[in-house]
Amino acid sequence: MALTPRLEFRQSQSLTLTPQLMQSIRLLQLSHLELNDFVDAELLRNPLLEREEGGGEDGGPAEAPERQTEMSAYEDTYTSGERVKDADEIAESYDTAVENVFPDAIAQDLGQSGGPDRNGRFEAGEAPDIDQFVASRPHLADHLEAQANMLLRMQADRLIARHLIDGLNEAGYLVVETSAVAELLGAEIEDVEAVLAVLQTCEPAGLFARNVAECLAMQLRERDRLDPMMQRLIDNLHLLAEHNMPALLKVLGCDREDLADMLAELRRLDPRPGFAFDSAPVEAVVPDVFVRPGPDGGWQVELNSDVLPRVLVNRVYYATVTRKTRNGAEKTFLSDCLANANWLTKSLDQRAQTITKVAAEIVRQQDGFLTHGVAHLKPMTLKMIAEAIEMHESTVSRVTAQKYLATPRGLFEMKYFFTTAIASSDGGSDHSAEAVRHRIRQLIDAEPANAILSDDNIAELLRQEQGIELARRTVAKYREGMNIPSSVIRRRQKKDLAALA
């Protein structure tokens, strides 16, 4: 058969991801903070978009305020000024006191600035926000630089101090080597060590330590409590971490009562002194969906409207500008802005509906968890939710990313409810891996000091109680994932607690 070029017509269907469709998909996985930032950027770029502030109708701007009467420059500066009455005349015309008409102005004149009186009442306007009176914590670097400038006189020493301060982590530990600082600055390592010794006297005690033992020793030295026995305890913290009390007593050469006193002294120390200073701001988690008990015994799923951006398309402004526009490029720009504005409002509405649909299905399938607790958490996958609401798994995955549900059981991320299934050996329903972890923790918390449960014992109890067939290494994996020590360490801990009690 000869190979010759030819023309053929074929008809096929395919899905093409347009830029707007890709942006709509991206909006699904944004958190409410990221979504608000995206909407703010669109509001700056698109003149046809505006936030819904309330009072305006959908599709048009809010009611415009009454237009002010224009005045000439002369009338504005002289004539108008003569017509304005002072506060006393205005208050006299209303037959009342000046403070009743201008409370804020009176407070400022009296130097009160809206503060409380002797009885704690605010006489001038509304009470101020309590956050205005909360003092912000100082930054660790600023706090230490102020002390270093007083302790160090030489400019070269202050330069070394600044580099050492930059080498602290959030806990206040020095994470850079003194040799590296000396090499960077071209200084002698003895000079860097000398500056470090001075900085270790800064308040609070424990800063600029290289490890936990040095940090605790510096605080004990500052309290004049670092005797030879306490120093031996600091040098053998690994035995304390292993709860090997017999070996620790042998090394220290003391009795259990003295050891208990020294451990109580250690508990009063701060192993992370740098955390007392301001660092990265902690952002509170705001729920995206509220789940409340319904009057019919079910559950009500409601979006948190406070975190959802609401935007409107100003069609009146678009019509006004379009009528006065003759340039083709400007008309094209306005048409693109209108199309993008319509797409954004539609995408935000579709995003809200999708989140509500996914959250409602999660609540429906996890009714036992909401009613009875984590022991009744069912195994659930993205595929189960996707098939129930007739969506793709990838869509459900994007919707549940960085979204939180506020339930009567607490605040949970949507991803929390998706757990693997563990088959039941007695033919019953499957168990959630999270529920199994919860039961393992309950068994360990309830174990007596004279009968510590091994991983084999826990696996056997799970099989007898609930028909959960787990291997010993699986129990060990779940236990380690919850930061629970082994049975050997737990036995030492409980024996030591009983002996020191």
Image (tube, rainbow, N blue to C red):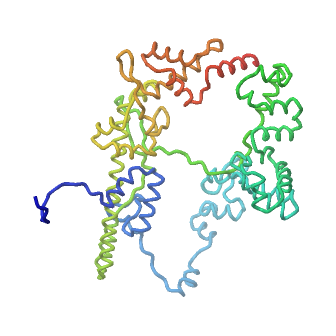
Residue drawn at 45 percent across, 62 percent down: 40
In-front residue for pair 43/176: 176
User: Can you say whether 256 is above or below 287 in the image?
Assistant: above
Residue drawn at 71 percent across, 24 percent down: 243
Q: Number of callouts in the render?
A: 0
| Relative image position of residue 440 (x, y in whole percent) | 52, 22
User: Can you say whether 463 is above or below 431 in the image?
Assistant: above
Name the side, left or right, on which 444 lies relative to 117: left
| Relative image position of residue 217 (x, y in whole percent) | 82, 38
Give the residue furthest to the bottom: 74
Name the side, left or right, on which 332 lies relative to 303: left
Q: Quadrant of the N terminus?
A: bottom left
Q: Quadrant of the C terminus?
A: top right
| Relative image position of residue 438 (x, y in whole percent) | 51, 25
In-front residue for pair 252/63: 252
| Relative image position of residue 202 (x, y in whole percent) | 82, 50
Name the side, left or right, on which 400 lies relative to 137: left
Name the side, left or right, on which 1 lies relative to 194: left
In-front residue for pair 492/290: 492
Residue drawn at 65 percent across, 52 percent down: 122
In-front residue for pair 329/121: 329
Give the residue furthest to the left: 1
